[in-house]
Amino acid sequence: MSIKKINSFFLLILFVSSFTLAQEASQDEQMKIWMDYMTPGEVHKAMASYVGDWKTDTKMWLTPGSDPITSSGESKSEMLLGGRYMKITNTGDFMGMPFEGISIEGFDNVMKQFTFVWIDNFGTGTMILKGTYDDATKSINYKGTMVDPVKKKEMPIRQVVTLLGPDKLSLEMFSEADGKEFKNTEVIYTRK
């Protein structure tokens, strides 16, 4: 499909979406909806409190019941686009190889859910997760998929980020082996 056809297709979708929305809301109402959608809120301010430099301690289990592989590294968090998203850059060493990973995290004001996109130099795929906050456990519970290069298909992933205080948090990742979920990664972030 040519770029011109793709652009025409997206313009058509935008036109139809705008026309449908216009029938449901006046122009002033539409503007307020868009302003509410684009304005960082209290959740974004809470995310910004985690901006800074962090030390990371990682454990990874390749299979259920195996001994963990441990590593340490550093992480830098910064807000992007006027406080709408957080970028976290991770660096370290894993099994003698330099490691780099980047996440972009956000909170969608309309959908009332967190988003998490991850890329790193140990693959060429993109992990995309969506999640909700649980106030009782002070954690964000994400679900999504990532590519399993051995099986050549996407596999379900669950990730839990627990806020352990203003200067510490944990990230746990769970995948499946033989149809059962197991914890394959744990990262403890401690503010420098």
Image (tube, grey):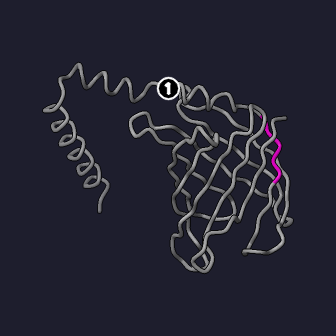
Residue 117, position in %: x, y? 56, 50
Q: Is residue 134 on the magenta stretch? A: no
Q: Report the span colored magenta.
A: 53-57
The residue at the far top in this view is 28
In this picture, residue 150 sits left or right of residue 112? right
In this picture, residue 38 sits left or right of residue 174? left
> What residue is disc 1 on?
40
Give the image quarter of residue 121: bottom right
Q: Nearer the viewer, residue 182 or 77?
A: 182
Quadrant (top left/top right/bottom left/bottom right) for the N terminus = bottom left
Check disc 1 and give the amino acid type: Pro
Q: Nearer the viewer, residue 32 or 79?
A: 32
Which element carries disc 1, helix, strand or loop?
loop
In this picture, residue 185 sits left or right of residue 149? right
Residue 50, relative to residue 116: is it above or below? above
Q: Nearer the viewer, residue 75 or 15?
A: 75
Quadrant (top left/top right/bottom left/bottom right) for the C terminus = top right
Q: Nearer the viewer, residue 182 or 119?
A: 182
Give the image quarter of residue 139: top right
Give the image quarter of residue 104: top right
Residue 77, position in %: x, y? 70, 37
